[in-house]
């Protein structure tokens, strides 16, 4: 009986070995048959075993995922490796317009919570080097004007009620414009590449938009802040947020939101300056804007300050 059981086990082992050998021979013959078909010019595609097809798809999936991850990594590295000066040039190119006309509503919220609202008409020309703002309401400031020339290096404020014109240059441009949280130099277009040097310090999302973060420091002839942090979109290069620092303190933050396509240009419809030092804020809402009409150059002269301006042009 013992010998019989041993014999049966041996028979099963022999059969298993033969089965394995037969399976291996069948796979070998299948490969040989496929090579022979190729040599004969037979265009019938070779039959891939199901388990092999699954492995192939799995491997392709891994390769695809790896490629996507690598692509994302390289893309992020490209943005971070672009030098700060190049980013300033791209921001300037995206934000500078040949000329414009717009109407705005300005709302100042004081530290005590009271509101003051103004309506303004605004013109710009010469790629932003000149601009004029005319206050239409309320009545006590109607006819007041702010004229900027030379990219904001020279600024004039005309007060109609007193028929007085003040000229702001240099450090005097730091004064509040009409009691708002924007200084005169904040309102100036300027030229980022002339006014600042910058370096890339990171990448972050602002309101869901991927942005590069720059630290910008003023040149000797630039604005009066110690430094700024600028977040600019990696897609359209427009500023999304700017933080202003002075003596190491975070003094103000500018938020640019509600971007719309206006005549083919992506444009922020709201700008809000939050004054952390004073506890106040100023909201500028774009009610109307066009880039199609070139303003009359005479608007950007000192003579225009005392002249009544009725129309858009």
Image (tube, grey):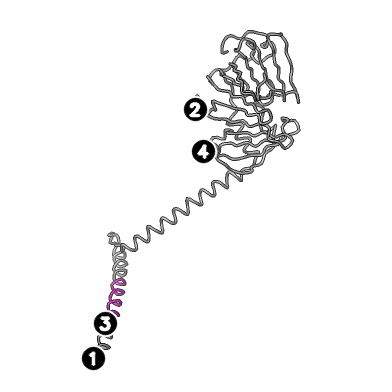
Q: Earlier in the sequence, mark 3 or mark 4?
A: 3
Residue on which disc 1 sits: 1
Question: On screen, 207 above or below 14?
Answer: above
* SS at circle 2: strand
Residue 125 x %, y %? 62, 20
Q: Residue furthest front?
A: 112
Residue on which disc 2 sits: 261
Distance in Å between CA atoms under marks 2 and 3:
79 Å
Question: On screen, 49 above or below 305?
Answer: below
Of residues 125 and 213, the one drawn nearer to the viewer in this rendering: 213
Residue on which disc 3 sits: 12
Q: Earlier in the sequence, mark 4 or mark 1?
A: 1
Residue on which disc 4 sits: 208
Of residues 160 and 280, the one drawn nearer to the viewer in this rendering: 280
- Residue contact between numbered discs 1 and 2, judged by CB atoms under 8 Å: no
Dot 1: within a 10 Å radius of its alpha carbon, few (fewer than 14), some, or many (20 or more) residues?
Answer: few
Magenta stretch, main secondary structure, is helix
Residue 20 on the magenta segment: yes
- Residue contact between numbered discs 1 and 3, judged by CB atoms under 8 Å: no
In the image, the segment drawn in magenta is 16-28
Distance in Å between CA atoms under marks 4 and 1:
80 Å
Residue 217 x %, y %? 70, 36
Residue 17 on the magenta segment: yes
Q: Residue 296's image quarter?
A: top right
Left or right of 102 on screen, residue 10: left
């Amino acid at each position: 009986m013992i010998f019989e059981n041993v014999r049966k086990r041996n028979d099963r082992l022999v059969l298993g070995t033969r089965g394995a050998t037969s399976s291996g021979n069948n796979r070998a013959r299948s490969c040989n048959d496929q090579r022979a078909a190729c040599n004969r010019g037979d265009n019938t595609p070779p039959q891939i075993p199901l388990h092999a097809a699954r492995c192939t798809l799995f491997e392709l999936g891994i390769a695809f995922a790896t490629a996507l991850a690598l692509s994302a990594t390289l893309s992020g590295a490209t943005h971070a490796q672009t030098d700060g000066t190049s980013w300033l040039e791209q921001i300037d190119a995206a934000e500078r317009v040949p000329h414009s006309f717009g109407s705005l509503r300005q709302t100042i919220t004081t530290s005590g919570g009271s509101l003051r609202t103004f309506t303004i008409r605004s013109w710009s020309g010469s790629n932003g080097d000149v601009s004029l703002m005319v206050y239409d309401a309320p009545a006590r400031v109607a006819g007041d004007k702010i004229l900027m020339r030379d990219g904001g290096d020279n600024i004039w404020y005309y007060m109609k009620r007193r028929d007085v014109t003040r000229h702001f240059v240099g450090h005097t441009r730091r004064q509040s414009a009409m009691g708002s949280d924007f200084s005169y130099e904040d309102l100036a277009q300027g030229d980022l590449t002339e006014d600042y040097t910058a370096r890339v310090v990171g990448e972050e999302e602002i309101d869901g938009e991927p942005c590069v973060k720059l630290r910008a420091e003023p040149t000797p002839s630039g604005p009066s802040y110690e430094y700024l942090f600028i977040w600019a979109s990696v897609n359209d290069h427009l500023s999304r947020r700017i933080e202003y620092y002075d003596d190491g303190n975070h003094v103000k933050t500018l938020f640019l939101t509600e971007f719309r396509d206006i005549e083919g240009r992506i444009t922020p419809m709201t700008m809000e300056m939050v004054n952390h030092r004073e506890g106040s804020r100023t909201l500028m809402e774009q009610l109307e804007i066009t880039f199609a009409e070139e303003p009359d150059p005479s608007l950007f002269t000192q003579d225009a300050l005392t002249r009544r301006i009725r129309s858009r042009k």
